[in-house]
Amino acid sequence: MKRNVPTEADWGNWGADLDTEYAHENFAGKTREEVFPLFQSNVIERTDELRFMPPVPFRYYMLAFRDYVLSERVFAVECEASDAASCFLGLILEKLESDPSVILPVMEELLPAAEEVAGRQEEYDAPVDIYGSFPRKVVRMRLLWDRSEALEDFEESLRKPASSEE
């Protein structure tokens, strides 16, 4: 699905929160490709900025993060690949646990990437004893996603008027 760069309206009242303001300062108006250098310069800090974005910018730039983590550029900086892969998987899990409505609309686009990263944990030079098991993180992701979708379906059914049975 083609997505446009988030507008100022998508960012909402970004100046009301220092974390969102900083994310806006770094990301606003940039294409997915234009933010690659931001991830490359400090992936841990950029992950934190993603965490505080409003939903539309979060989804857009989370897909940029996905593209970066799957690109060869992630391997250009020492230690970058392991941190990038771990941050990517961790942020997906965090959003599924704490704010699923924000990430669910892009999970179909994120999960295949998460599975690919998990299958390449050794290539990302991310030792299990330091970063944990990426495949286990993806299993947890799938469980959280399934639970979130089931909850959404249940809540949707509650909003529908009951059919009269006669």
Image: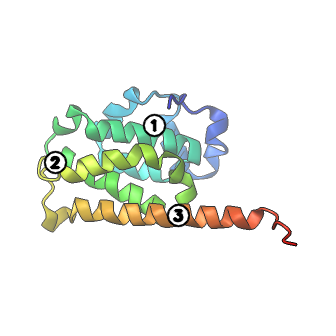
Query: Label 3 to label 1, Cα distance in Å?
Result: 31 Å
Residue 55 in the image, given as x and y percentages of width and height: 57, 47
Amino acid type for the residue under numbered disc 2 = Tyr
- Residue 99 is at least partly visible in this image: no
Residue 30 in the image, given as x and y percentages of width and height: 47, 28
Between 86 and 146, the one nearer to me in the picture = 146
Do labels 1 and 2 touch, CB within 8 Å? Answer: no
Amino acid type for the residue under numbered disc 1 = Asn
Residue for badge 2: 124
Nearer mark to the viewer, of 1 and 2 = 2
Between 4 and 13, the one nearer to me in the picture = 4
Q: Secondary structure at mark 3?
A: helix
Residue for badge 3: 148
Residue 120 in the image, given as x and y percentages of width and height: 17, 49
Residue 149 in the image, given as x and y percentages of width and height: 54, 60
Between 48 and 143, the one nearer to me in the picture = 143
Residue for badge 1: 26
Nearer mark to the viewer, of 3 and 2 = 3
Residue 98 vertical placement versus 65 (above, below): below
